Image (cartoon, rainbow, N blue to C red):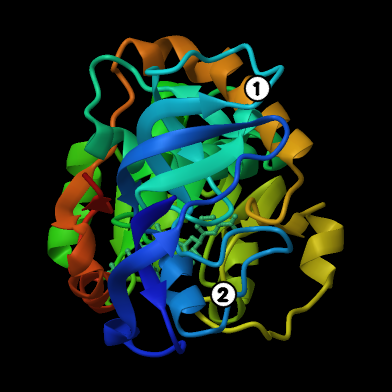
Amino acid sequence: MTMKAIMIDQPGDEDCMQLSDATSPELGPGMVRIRNFASGINRADLLQRQGFYPPPAGASPILGLECAGEIAELASGVTNFTIGDRVMALLSGGGYAENVVVDAGSVIPLPDALSFEEGAGLTETLLTVFLNVFQLGELPEGGSVLVHGGGSGIGTTTIELVKRAGGRVIATAGSAEKCKRCLELGADAVANYREDDWVETVRAATDGRGVDVILDSIGGSYLEQNLSALAIDGSLVLIGLMGGAKAEISLGALLMRRLKVMGSTLRTRSNEQKAAIVRAFLEQFGEDLAAGEIRPTLHEVFALEDAPDAHRMMKASTHFGKLVLRVR
Ligand SMILES: NC(=O)c1ccc[n+]([C@@H]2O[C@H](COP(=O)([O-])OP(=O)(O)OC[C@H]3O[C@@H](n4cnc5c(N)ncnc54)[C@H](OP(=O)(O)O)[C@@H]3O)[C@@H](O)[C@H]2O)c1
């Protein structure tokens, strides 16, 4: 069976992606097939397209870490979904295509209140923020979070989830416009990282205490400042390296202020681990999600064949929130 998909002959710039015919993926044990309507774009897709972020073993080589569509086929023994169910799913690859197969444990019912395009832009960021801020970062009740790139898919979702859980959020962003939009979305304080001293912003917003958790996708260039923005017993969870992979720090701060620094990726985890994250997420936020109260901040929806334009927009970082591809 063939399908339309965005294919890459040779890794490279945006125009290496082309809409072509591809072979539909095979349904393996424990999986569902999704008739895909829309796929979210993530920063990692830009790296993978250039050949810098190979898919984990066994994953589709096609780009795309999340999608939303209808269940089209179930492996034997999969009973928690029915053909025709509207769903959204976390993928380790394969989203930029008309047909997607994925372990049933990575699939979430799509709330009636959400369109496929909205649902397509939710799963990856919701589960990343839940895993890293709530589970690994152990955000205490009423605790505070600093998220870098408040206008990113990850940043907008962090503001949404942490505020919903009763916490406080401080965000950094690179323009006055993005800072304003973070505040409108619910952030308690913002810093324009190009102009402000964001460690001072954190101190001012936390009565000098620092934040409980930092969700950081910048890495090396921010490490020292991040440590000084943490409260005693605080956690820095590193999920990206946009500011470099190396840094020198004084370990004294870690000892004296009992800080934790950890790295985390969602994509490389086993199906069992992903299913456990999905279950824990639904336990805490499932009712809000089903009621349509958790929604993505969608910046723009592109046609599948316009994936190169969507990647150019993400590279230029002119978006606020999520970019999505309409597959059908
Ligand atoms: N480890 C994991 O499991 C995991 C999962 C999902 C995502 N991630 C990572 O999370 C990050 C965000 O992903 P995304 O898809 O949401 O990306 P995105 O929408 O493209 O956002 C990237 C953001 O980074 C911001 N940024 C760049 N330099 C910055 C700096 N020096 N200080 C503060 N912000 C800065 C940009 O903000 P301005 O435009 O305001 O400059 C932009 O909003 C990526 O690094 C991605 O790889 C990791």
Residue occupied by mark 1: 280
For this view, does 48 lie left or right of residue 298? right
Determine the residue located farthest toward the right in the rendered image.
255
Residue 162 horizontal/vertical position (percent):
45, 32
Q: Residue at x 40, y 43 (%)?
A: 67
The answer to which image quadrant residue 160 occupies is: top left
Q: Amino acid at mark 1?
A: Ala
Residue occupied by mark 2: 241
Residue 136 horizontal/vertical position (percent):
71, 41
Q: Can residue 171 be spotted in the picture?
A: no
Q: Which mark is residue 40?
A: none
Q: Is mark 1 within 8 Å of ligand 1?
A: no
Which quadrant is the C terminus positioned in? top left
Q: Marks 1 and 2, how far apart in space?
A: 27 Å
For this view, does 128 lie left or right of residue 36? right
Q: Residue at x 54, y 47 (%)?
A: 91
Q: Return the residue nearer the eye: 289 or 194.
A: 289
For this view, does 185 lie left or right of residue 221? left
